[in-house]
């Protein structure tokens, strides 16, 4: 079972390399890659689980991304070792992981909502944020991909947070996905 993340990672990297070949002539491509094995919080931890009943210690997450002017930003999340046949939400967040899920701050928004917390579907949506909702298979493995038509400027996301349910889209609840279960630092 440990070979699955390696094989999936190689497949994603190969796909990203193909994207680079077609976009490199148009604009520089920025690559993002992060990997972590979830543990309880400790200073310096980069993959933290806050709810071991839903994201067990030892579960893993991999994030791969490419970003280029003209093609936008594509982010892929691969997880292993989570609960089987379960729905999770996941989003890019503004801050790095910390002792609590709240330390990751709000979702990163390309066009920030002036109202906090952001629950307006005009801002809290998968075109203005990076949403990576997924459903695990019977082995607790899943993959999710987000593609947006923008790239990061001077403001950047710093983590991906896994939430307890798929993301809501209705007014007043848009962008919400329940409790923050785990966090992976990502250098977007």
Image (cartoon, rainbow, N blue to C red):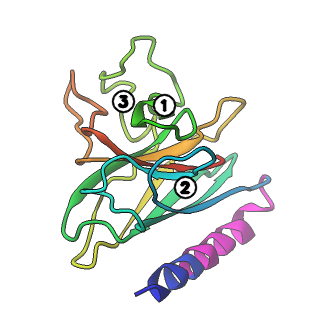
Which label lies toward us, 1 or 3?
A: 1
Residue farthest to the top, as pictured: 115
The residue at which mark 1 appears reads as 103
Measured Cα–Cα span from mark 1 to mark 3: 19 Å
In this rendering, position of residue 173 left or right of residue 94: left
Q: Which residue is mark 2?
A: 74
Considering the numbered disc 1 on the image, is that residue within a helix, a strand or a loop? helix
How far apart marks 2 and 1 lie (CA) works out to: 25 Å
Residue 152 vs residue 60, the one in the foreground: 60
Give the residues drawn in magenta, as a range.
11-27
Is 149 placed left or right of 114 in the picture? right
Relative to residue 89, is residue 80 drawn left or right? Answer: right
Badge 2 crowding class, 10 Å Cα cut-off, few under 14, some 14 to 19, many 20 or more, is: many
Residue at image point 68% right, 73% down: 17
Q: Which type of secondary structure does the marked residue at label 3 adopt?
A: loop
Q: Position of residue 51 (x, y in %)?
A: 30, 49
For marks 2 and 1, give the one nearer the viewer: 1
Image location of residue 154, percent across then percent down: 72, 30
Mark sitting earlier along the chain (2/3): 2
Q: Which mark is residue 124?
A: 3
- Can you say which quadrant of the picture contains the N terminus? bottom left
Main secondary-structure element of the magenta-colored stretch: helix
């Amino acid at each position: 079972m440990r070979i699955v993340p390696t094989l999936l990672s190689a497949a994603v990297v190969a796909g990203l390399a193909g994207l680079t070949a077609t976009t490199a002539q148009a604009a520089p491509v920025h690559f993002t890659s992060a990997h972590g094995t979830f543990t309880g919080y400790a200073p310096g931890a980069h993959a933290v689980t806050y709810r071991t009943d839903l994201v067990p210690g030892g579960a893993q997450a991999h994030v791969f991304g490419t970003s280029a002017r003209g093609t936008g930003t594509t982010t892929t999340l691969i997880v292993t070792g989570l609960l089987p046949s379960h729905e999770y939400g996941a989003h890019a967040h503004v801050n790095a992981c910390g002792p609590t899920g709240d330390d990751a701050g709000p979702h990163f928004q390309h066009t920030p909502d002036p109202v906090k917390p952001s629950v307006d579907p005009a801002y809290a949506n998968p075109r203005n944020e990076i949403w990576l909702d997924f459903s695990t298979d019977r082995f607790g493995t899943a993959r999710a991909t987000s593609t947006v038509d923008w790239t990061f400027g001077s403001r950047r996301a710093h983590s991906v947070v896994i939430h307890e349910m798929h993301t809501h889209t209705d007014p007043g609840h848009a962008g919400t996905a329940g409790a923050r279960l785990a966090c992976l630092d990502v250098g977007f």
